[in-house]
Image (cartoon, rainbow, N blue to C red):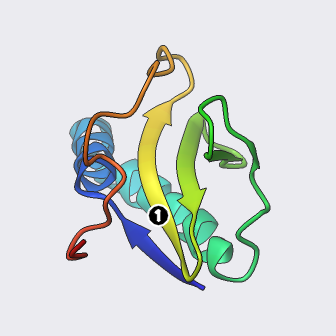
C-alpha cells in the first residue's frame, strides 16, 4: 500500500519542522525522522492506528512524540490528512479537498 500526503498535512509537517528548527536543528531533524518512520510503517500496516474521532479516519500515535497523525485508508493507498500536536484541539471536520493526496487527480 502506498502512503500519500495531502497538501494540508505536508504544510503542517513543514510548520512542525520550522518550529523545532528554531529551537534546535538537531531536534527538528529527529522529530521529522520519527514522523517519517512512523508513517512509512503504514505501508505494511495501514490499520495499525486506532479508529479516528472523525468518521472514516484512523489516528496514529507517534511513540515518543506528542504528535498524532490522522489518516484515511483507501483501496490502494493511505492518505495522510493531518499532523498535529496533541496539546491542540482536534479539528471538528476536514475542509473540502483536505483529504486529496498531493498530485492526485479526481
Q: Is residue 20 above or below residue 63?
A: above
The residue pinned by badge 1 equals 79
Pointer 1 local density, CA inside 10 Å: few below 14, some 14–19, many at least 20: many
Image x and y of residue 18, in percent: 22, 44
* Residue sitting at x 42%, y 50%: 81
Residue at image coords 62%, 64%: 38
Front residue of 91/63: it is 91
Q: Residue furthest front?
A: 106
Which quadrant would residue 106 be assigned to in this image? Answer: bottom left
Q: Nearer the viewer, residue 4 or 105?
A: 105
Say what secondary structure mark 1 lies in: strand
Q: Is residue 20 above or below residue 36?
A: above
Q: Residue at x 66, y 29 (%)?
A: 53
The residue at the point 51 percent across, 20 percent down is: 90
Q: Position of residue 25 (x, y in %)?
A: 29, 52
Q: How many marks?
A: 1
Relative side of 70 to 5, left or right: right
Residue toward you, 9 or 105: 105
Left or right of 12 on screen, residue 31: right
Residue 25 against residue 106 in the figure, above or below: above
Q: Residue 54, percent across and down?
A: 59, 32
Residue 104 position within the rendered picture, expressed as x and y whole percent measured from the top left: 25, 75
Relative to 47, say whether 99 is above or below.
Answer: above
Name the image quarter holding the N terminus. bottom right
Amino acid at each position: 500500500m502506498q502512503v500519500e500526503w495531502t497538501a494540508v498535512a505536508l504544510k503542517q509537517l513543514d510548520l512542525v519542522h520550522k518550529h523545532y528548527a528554531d529551537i534546535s536543528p538537531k531536534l527538528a531533524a529527529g522529530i521529522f525522522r520519527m514522523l517519517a518512520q512512523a508513517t512509512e510503517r503504514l505501508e505494511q500496516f495501514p490499520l495499525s492506528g486506532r479508529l479516528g474521532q472523525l468518521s472514516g479516519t484512523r489516528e496514529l500515535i507517534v511513540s515518543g512524540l506528542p504528535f498524532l497523525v490522522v489518516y484515511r485508508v483507501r483501496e490502494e493507498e493511505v492518505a495522510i490528512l493531518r499532523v498535529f500536536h496533541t496539546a491542540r484541539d482536534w479539528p471538528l471536520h476536514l475542509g473540502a479537498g483536505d483529504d486529496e493526496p498531493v498530485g492526485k487527480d479526481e
